[in-house]
Image (cartoon, grey):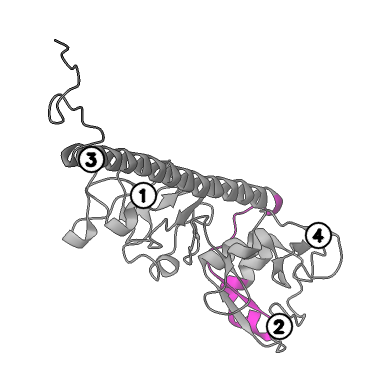
Amino acid sequence: MHRSNRMQPNQNRRHSGFTLIELLVAIGIVAILAGLLLSGIGGATSTVNKAKAANELRSLETALASFHSEFGAYPPSEITIYEDPAGWNTDPRSRSLIQKYWPSFDFTKTRTINSDDSTNVSIELNGAECLAFFLGGVPQSGALVGFSKNPADPFSRTGNNRTGPFHEFIASRFVDKDSDDIPEYVDTFAGQTSPIVYFSSYDGRGYRSAEITPLMTNGIYRQGKETDPTMGQADDTTPWKEKTFQLISPGLDGQYGTGGYYNPDDTSGLSQEDADNLTNFTTGTLK
């Protein structure tokens, strides 16, 4: 008698596809891998952005060294430029600084520094503006065109015989926070609006608190001793780069922080705003 080999419908049927549990497991694994990938990409992007900003500071250091070689001193980090000759007579500090760089400067000449038609403007430059002005030169049509080699009139825009710019500034990264036509320069972080700040030690004569306090209530960064003047103890610390200058980029958060004491071995001494700052006195961010 012939026996059929056909299987019954509900016997030994092999299922195809995934069960719900298998699908959820697969989705979970894919999500984890995607998260790891995105985290890796984000970390790599952050590292690249920090490296670009740090490289900018190194370029500015080189430019400042070139300025020092040309003029015998680093730029100031606060000065007033007068278009009206009478202004120089009221400000001996600014006058003496200009004479340091241009001993034959003609203080009797009326000048036009910015785009204002008036010639009686007093242009007060802070550290960020000094960085751009002294490394870039006088402004013209949205660019900085160096200084005339005429020692009596270095702020003239005419003539091709010029000194500087000492740094290759990118015009799209200029900002003008106080609308005086003297730009400040922001770092390479996307969307940055806070400029790179510059503080001069005036070749070792000392940093001036009046220049620093508007940005950092605790002053510039100091070396990492435990002395804290706010606790009634003597402030016997010395600033980083006490003989030259400090450059500070606010980093991704656009905040400069409070300055004060910086100790690379201390992981808790700086505010959150300080932590992502980039400077010319430590590699990478402060923390």
Mark sitting earlier along the chain (4/3): 3
Q: Which amino acid does label 2 sit on?
A: Pro
Identify the mark at residue 7; answer none if there is no mark: none
Q: What residue type is labelled 1?
A: Thr
The answer to whether mark 4 and mark 1 are in CB contact below 8 A is no
For marks 2 and 1, give the CA distance: 39 Å
Mark sitting earlier along the chain (4/1): 4
For marks 2 and 3, give the CA distance: 81 Å
Above or below, comparing residue 69 to residue 173 in the picture: above
Screen quadrant of the N terminus? top left
Identify the mark at residue 23; answer none if there is no mark: 3
Q: Residues within 10 Å of mark 4 (few under 14, many from 20)?
A: some
Q: Where is residue 274? Give x, y as percent.
A: 33, 56
Q: How crowded is mark 3: few (under 14 residues within 10 Å), some or many (20 or more)?
A: few
User: Residue at the spot x=48%, y=56% of the render?
Assistant: 189
Q: How crowded is mark 1: few (under 14 residues within 10 Å), some or many (20 or more)?
A: some
Mark sitting earlier along the chain (2/3): 3
Q: What residue type is labelled 4?
A: Arg
The residue identified by callout 1 is: 238
Camera-side residue of 281 and 34: 34
Which stretch is magenta? Answer: 70-94
The residue identified by callout 2 is: 85
Q: Outermost residue, top direction? A: 1
Mark sitting earlier along the chain (2/1): 2
Residue 135: say if magenta. Answer: no
Q: Where is residue 52? Give x, y as percent.
A: 52, 46
